[in-house]
Structure formats: structure tokens, C-alpha cells
Image (cartoon, coloured by chain):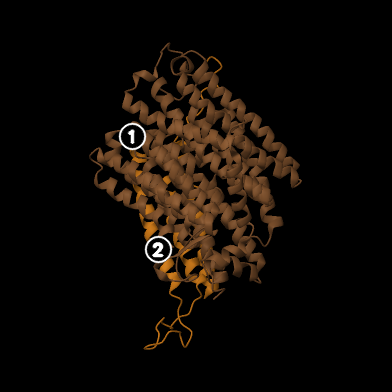
Amino acid sequence: MEVVLALLAGLMVAAAVYLMLWGDMMRFLFGLMLMSNAVNLVIFASGRLTPGQPPLLGAGGKLPETAMANALPQALILTALVIGFGLFAFALVLALRAHHSFGHLEMNDMRAAEPVAKSADPQE
Amino acid sequence: MSWIVSLPLIIPFATAVLSFLWRRSHLGGLVSVTGAAAQLVAAGVLMASTWQNGYTVGQMGGWDAPFGITLVADLLSAVMVVITAITGLAVAVYALSEIDARREELGYHALFHVLLTGVTGAFLTGDLFNLYVWFEVMLIASFGLLVLGGTKAEIDGGVKYVALNLVSTMLFLMATGLLYGLTGSLNMADLAQSVRASDNQGLVTVIAMMFMVAFGVKAALFPLFFWLPASYHTPAFSVSAVFAGLLTKVGVYALIRAFTLIFVSDVALTHQILLWAAVLTMITGVLGAASQNDFRKILSFHIVSQIGYMVLGLALFTPLALTGAVFYLVHHIIVKANLFLVSGVAHKLAKGTDLSRIGGLYKTAPLLAFLFLIPAFSLAGFPPLSGFWAKYVVVKASFEAGAFVAGAAALVVGALTIFSMTKIWAEAFWKDHPDGQEPRLRDIALRERLLALAPIAGLAALTVVIGLFPAPFLDLASRASAQLLDPQAYIDAVMPGGPS
């Protein structure tokens, strides 16, 4: 099962990188979303997969008597999801503002902060 | 003990909440400055406690390490927190002269203090996943500050900044997940032990490389620095000053922490890569600066170049080199934030930062010219300013360690730094204003002038004091470096009961 998850995460990262290198901001953000899900899968798998063993202790127990699911990766993923959601929402609004400002989302053509040098013209 | 480490975090967060509530009145700015001053006091208390005991440790929620979240201040962390608070206070005061009511209403002061919270948290945490969370706190606040003005250039810089930083964050998170899978722990002290004991050292090195890339993006290391010169010259001057002072230094701090505490099992490989990255960072940064013709763009490229010196100190991995790295961090934050603040006043007087369109500031504002010269000379490494000692220690350490290429590169880069500072001096201050304008400091309203010049003068005085009396600061830096090279003491301080 770990192998399947590992392959899946690898595939998702590959797809994410492909989308991100496109140069279009929307595709970049989709790539980012895909990548963050891949990362969450990695965290989940690295906590070891223990299906069918709920993380419950017996009454008054302090230590698990049998193998049980690791709850920590799920807490980590939950945190990462919430943070990722906030950042993604911000990035979407930023994309909207960029579209208002530039009229397109082609990241290579956004040159307001670093204008292409005009000094190619020796007259200037 | 735990309140001493948590107060420098609680204060800026509380300040952020209060200044957000009062964002529509002038009280917001007042709260911001008061909060920054209070944080400085708390940071001083933390520094005193850490100086006395070596380490100040707080276990949050009463869960002992390695199970709970630990806040740890060793001397490096404590120094960084103090310097963060100093920069925070200086920029909070300066912001009162620059930030208009519209930006205040959008929550400038609140975002600023959330940023300080994130930076301080990153310096204090002793837990890798918690470090990720603080990075995100810092990141989201910096996103907000960067695009607050909403101009086309700010949006453009914001897009690049956001994109590259988010990718680095993903990598950081993935590396954290893999490291957790390998060791079953996230507490840095616990990780230091279990990583060393791990029988899968190959995988450890792979994960170390992922951390190096992730933190390298944050620190603006070659070849990962492109987001920095694309964005740092776009926002308000207070924002670029605090970014320039603190943000990349969090990346450097994370590199230092990770590669002195956790990943020291393959120093020959990892630190060699860091060494070449540092040399190339120094050189590309300074060459990039030489090709620019804008006050803030030149300064931005110099951040990149100076990051190289700090990482060089880490890469050499000797006591003297780490002393140099710590000293350099402190010196650089003060000087760099100050230069950006100066560029803000220059912009206000000469109506621009494009060096070909401004000038005449020496004639019309000699005080500003004087206040520019101090941090500029310090940055270039002139005695008797702080930059001289910082460069001297790093260069000495590289020659002692036999890294002659790195030492020579550091010297040449220092000379080229003088070249760019001279360029700014000649263009902005020396030559006449191309439009024949004669902007005077007197033309700025008294209140605004005081609020802008007081923090600049204060930071400049700090550079001079460190430069004239370097001994106590070098002593502090060398104690911090001794701590960094003794991970066992850190582990014992965090987990006094020994490994669980």
C-alpha cells in the first residue's frame, strides 16, 4: 500500500511541476494545489499505514495494548490543509488582482516591477 | 520559565489584534509603537535569562519534549529576537511618517506585528513542524504587506514572491514529512539524536538536501534568489526595510539551526555544497547590484550578496566562522533595514528612486547624506563600523580553514560593494538634481521629519557603537557559536530527563 501511495504522490508532483512550468498563473495555482495534496499524502504515508486499528485506549489505559493508527500525521495534515487553504485563497485573489492590472495571467509577461531594459536603443 | 520565552510572541500578536481594532484612528500607530517597544523589553529579559543560564526552555501546555511543542532560546535565538525587536521598533516608528491613512485602514500595523510574531516564533521554536507554521504566519503577513498598496508593480512583485515562496514551503513540508517518517519525531533536539542514530544515512542526506533547497529559497541563496530582487523594491519603504532586515535572515537562521543541530552527519558533502552556494551567492549578488540603476534595486541585490557571507560562515563550520556568521547576521539586519529607511527619505525628497532621475541630496539634505554614509560604509566593511568586524571575522575564518577561494571572493565582493555604494552616493547625493529641484529636509513637516530620521539615526548609532566596541558583541557571538557546535548541550537543555 505504501508503494501505491508513494507512486501516486510522485505522479502528482510530476503533474504539478508540469502545470507550474506552463507560465500561466492559474495553471501554476492548480499545480500548487496538486503539489500540496501530494505533500499531504507523503506525510500521511510516512506516519505508517495501519488500517482497521483505531487509536483508542482501553478504559483507564495509558498505553496502547495492540498496534494502533498514528493520529499525529492526521493532525499535521489538518494543520497543513488549513494553512494551505488560506494561502490558496490569498493566491487566487492575487491572481484576480493581477488579471485586473495586466489583463492577462501570463507570468512571463508581467514586467511592471522589472521593466525590460530599453537601453538597447543607443540613442537613449 | 515558559513565560519568558512566550512573551516575545504574545506581545506582538496582542499588538496586532489591538492595532487592527484601532486601525481607523491614529491610536493604531501609537499601539504599534508601544507594542514594538514592549517586545523589545521582553526580548531583553529573554536575552538576560539566556545569557545567565545558557538556554531558556519553555514546554508549551505542560507537555514535555519531545511530545509537546517546545520553545527554546539559545544565545543565537535570543540575539535574533532582540535584533528583531530593535528593527521592529525602528520600522514601527518610521512607518508613522510614511504609511498613509488608507494603508492603516487596510490593517498595515496589524500585518506588521503578525509578521514580527512569525519571525520571532521561527527564531524561538524547537519543533520542526512548528517552524513550518511560523514560516506560514510570516509568509501570509508578508504577502499582505507586499501588495497592500495595490499598484501594478506591487502586484507584479507579489506574484513572483508568492509563487516562489509557496513552492519552497511545499518542499519544506515534504521534507518534514519524510523526516518524521524516518525518525518518528519532530522535536529538533530529539531529531538531532535520532538522525545521528539512524541507520539510513543515505536518506538522511537526501532529506537534508530538501531542507537546504527549501531554506535556501527563503534565505535567497544562489541560484534560488530570483524572487527577492523582483519584489523588494515595490512596496512601501517601511515594508521593504523590515523585509530586507528580517525575512531572508529567518532563512539563514533556519539553515544554521538545521545544519548545526540536525544534519551534521555528512558535513563533507552538505557543507561543501553550502560553501559553493555561498561563494556564488556573494558574487552574483554583487554583480547584479552593479548592473542596477535604482536605489532600492541595488540594495536588494546587496541583500543577496551579503547572505553569502553568513552562509559562508556556516559552511566553514569552525568556531570562528560561526562566530562570524552570527555577528554578520546582527550587523546586517541593522545596516540593511537602515539603508532602506534612508532610501525612503531620499524618495520623499527627490521624488524617486531611479538614480538617473534624482540627485542633489548632499547639497540640500546634508544630514541625510551623513546618515546614509554610516550604514553604507558599514555595509562595505569600513573600519571602525560593524561591517568591518563582521567581514574581518568571516574572511579570517575562511583563510584559517584553508578556503582560500572563498576568502578571496569575500574580499573582492567587499570591494565591489564599495563600488555600488559609491554609485548611489555619486548619483543620488553628489550630482545635481537633473530637474534642478532642490528638495530640502526642512520642507517635510517637523513631526514627519523626526519620525523618519530618529529611527535612521538610532540604527546608525547602533552600527557605530558595535563598530567602536566590538569586544562584547564578538564575545556574545562566539558564545553563541560555541553553543551551536555543541548540540548535546542543546539536547540536554530541552530534554533534561534524557531521551524518552
Query: Is B386 on the left or on the right of B120, as rendered?
Result: right
Amino acid type, mark 2: Thr
* Residue occupied by mark 2: A79
Q: Colour of chain B?
A: brown
Closer to us: B106 or B222: B106
The answer to whether residue B171 shows anywhere in this view is: no
Chain under callout 2: A
In this rendering, the answer to whether B350 lies above or below B111 is above
Q: Which mark is residue B96?
A: 1
All told, the count of numbered labels is 2
Residue A43 position within the rendered picture, expressed as x and y whole percent measured from the top left = 49, 67
User: Between tags 1 and 2, which lies in front?
Assistant: 1
Q: Residue furthest left?
A: B25
Chain A on-screen colour? orange
Q: Where is B335 relative to B188, above or below?
A: above
Quadrant in the picture for the C terminus of chain B: bottom right
Position of the N terminus of chain B, as image quadrant, is: bottom left
Residue placed at 71% from the left, 44% from the top? B398
Most distant residue in the top direction: B436
Image position of B374 (left or right of B15): right
Q: Is residue B92 above or below residue B439?
A: below
